[in-house]
Amino acid sequence: MSEKFKPENKEVAQKVELRIVEPRGDKNFMIGFEGKSQEECRTYNWAIESVLKKAGLNPFHQVGASPSEQHGPGYHAWEIWKKATKEDLKMLLPEIEQEARSMLSG
């Protein structure tokens, strides 16, 4: 994702509630959200991946609403494959929100 993301319809995507999902089983911490539209999911997926990569946390799009539709409406979660604490991730949530807002306004 080296190019600047440009949402197709800036009016569609809105702020979503980002949440930190605790590790369980063979899964590490994840950042998850519930998206109502494809555009909203695309915007937040891009923002989460971008911010986590900049932080060196090696994110992986673990859960998508539909295996055949990467940005389909529904639940999405990004697993953190590097060592991180809940506090580390909490500190990144505002940056993810800001990144999503800048994509929508730019």
Image (cartoon, rainbow, N blue to C red):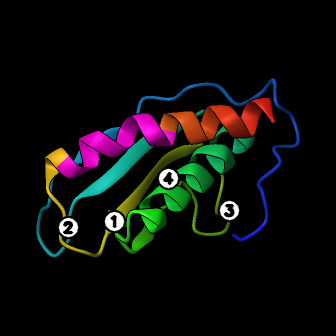
Query: Do tag 2 and tag 1 residues touch (Cβ < 8 Å)?
Result: yes
Q: Residue at x 58, y 60 (%)?
A: 66
Q: Which residue is mark 1?
A: 79
> Which amino acid type is shown beneath numbered disc 3?
Glu
Q: Which residue is mark 2?
A: 28
Q: Cα distance, mark 3 to mark 2?
A: 23 Å
**Rendered position, 42 above or below 100:** below
In the image: residue 100, left or right of residue 55: right
Q: Cα distance, mark 4 to mark 3?
A: 17 Å
Q: Cα distance, mark 4 to mark 1?
A: 10 Å
User: Which element is circle 4 on?
Assistant: helix
- In the picture, residue 105 is in which quadrant? top right
> Which amino acid type is shown beneath numbered disc 2?
Asn
Identify the magenta region: 88-96
Q: Which residue is mark 4?
A: 48
Q: Cα distance, mark 2 to mark 4?
A: 16 Å
User: Which element is circle 2 on?
Assistant: loop
Query: Do tag 2 and tag 4 residues touch (Cβ < 8 Å)?
Result: no
